[in-house]
Image: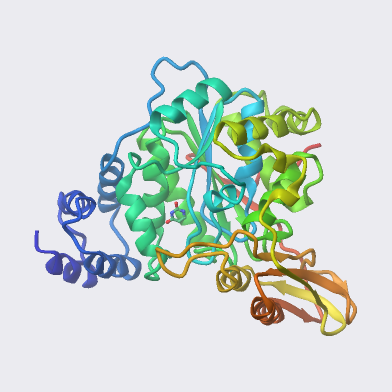
Amino acid sequence: MVIPSLIQHKRDGHALPPGQWRELIREYTAGRVPDYQMSALLMAVVWRGMEPEELAELTDAMIDSGDRLRFDGFAQSRVDKHSTGGVGDKVSLLLAPMVASCGVAVPMMSGRGLGHTGGTLDKLESIAGFRTALSLDETRGQIERLGCAMLGQTPEIAPADKRLYALRDVTGTVESIPLIAASIMSKKLAEDLNGLVLDVKTGSGAFLPESDRALELAQTMIGLGLVRGCPTVALLTAMDRPLGRACGNALEVEEAIEGLRGEGPEDLMEVTYALGVEMLLLVKAARDAPDARARLQRSISSGDALQKFAAVIEAQGGNPAVLEDPSVLPQAAEVEVYRAPRDGVIVQVEPRRIGRAIIELGGGRRTIEDEIDPSVGFVIPAQPGETVRTGEPLASIFARDQTGIEAGIAALREAIVIGEEGRLTPLITHRVTADGVTAPNPRVG
Ligand code: URA
């Protein structure tokens, strides 16, 4: 295959002929296509998009680039959740043990930070010893024993996506509906699931900020799931401000543990419950939405979800003492409070700026090889719509040194906009199924 011609073809807005995506993915995974050619092609896709047939072929080729989890003979239903990426989004850390405590198996396969967004794997790895690199056999064994495993993409699952994901992260080629859809669905469809729930973010901190594009992404992924035998439902949730208060790997683990103790911030818990309700409904583990919500709430009030998380941490080599004593998590050397520079109303807490600042502080990657510092980040209790007075604490910055603190202050000055009027937009705006778009399930309990 002549790669420059394929790049030119896509650059000029044409679909690649049938079979070309499959061959390209095979050659790329085998190391016979260099990253510079692949990134040029990806950039052409960002601009020109893909036809549905191309997307289907790309997704299948990415699934077939590796192996699959297999649950033959396993009676329990399996369901997973995936987010399109956000800032402060630690929902997976709560949701996997909560849903597993309700008797539904959760092989939660997550990713690393991508662009300005955080990744569940990076968060989990801030727990000393936690091993996210489980093999397929280990994953199946742990699912059989505990009903829950929290892992990274194994080398066997969609290896093509693993390479492409890392490449897109550092080449400005994340923001594309077909590339995001193929990336997410190739991993999820290799998990042998009975259902999948997608958290599709909208707003300035999402990869696709406009809600019509987010909706298109949701529908694209639902279509890919449906045709491949995996019922898929999506919620569109707000990412025009960070989710919860903590942003940064270890800080987010701490907040997730608070959530599992029943002390999580309201917005984080609302999104977590809403997604959990969909997960239980998809595999018919609850009668209806109120029943599903009650089961999830019981998983917290009974302590079952916390215990499940402890069992998962222990099984995967992590230090479960973190649940009792979060100070065993990596601690930042410097902490400073950021105060309101003026009186007014908070107009915006801009998540993309916060996400980029976490990278500047060392908590995310600039290049594929970067090691991250799990201790750094922000805790931002301030929310749009709140009235503040000059000097009132709005956020805390956690950094390695004074240079980091100064970068954090500069970021917060830009991210937290104070003006005359502001309001919190609705957290969950759409529920998308194969049958269409509806309002989300009403909040119950
Ligand atoms: N999450 C993924 O797994 N892939 C993307 O491309 C974006 C978010």
Q: Quadrant of residue 401?
A: bottom right
Residues 111 and 54: in front is: 111
The quadrant in which the N terminus is found is: bottom left
Residue 437 is left or right of residue 271, and the answer is left
Q: Quadrant of residue 197?
A: top right
Judge whether 269 appears above or below 340 on screen.
above
Q: Position of residue 151 (x, y in %)?
A: 49, 40
Residues 50 and 344: in front is: 344
The quadrant in which the C terminus is found is: top right
Q: Position of residue 348 (x, y in %)?
A: 71, 73
Residue drawn at (68%, 47%), measured in percent from left and top?
A: 271
Q: Position of residue 129 (x, y in %)?
A: 56, 43
Residue drawn at (79%, 27%), measured in percent from left and top?
A: 302
- Quarter of the displayed picture in which ligand 1 can be seen: bottom left
Residue drawn at (68%, 81%), measured in percent from left and top?
A: 406
Q: Residue furthest bottom?
A: 342
Determine if residue 407 is in view.
yes
Residue 153 is left or right of residue 51, and the answer is right
Q: Quadrant of residue 405?
A: bottom right
Judge whether 383 appears above or below 233 on screen.
below
Residue 358 is left or right of residue 219, and the answer is right
Residue drawn at (41%, 30%), measured in percent from left and top?
A: 192
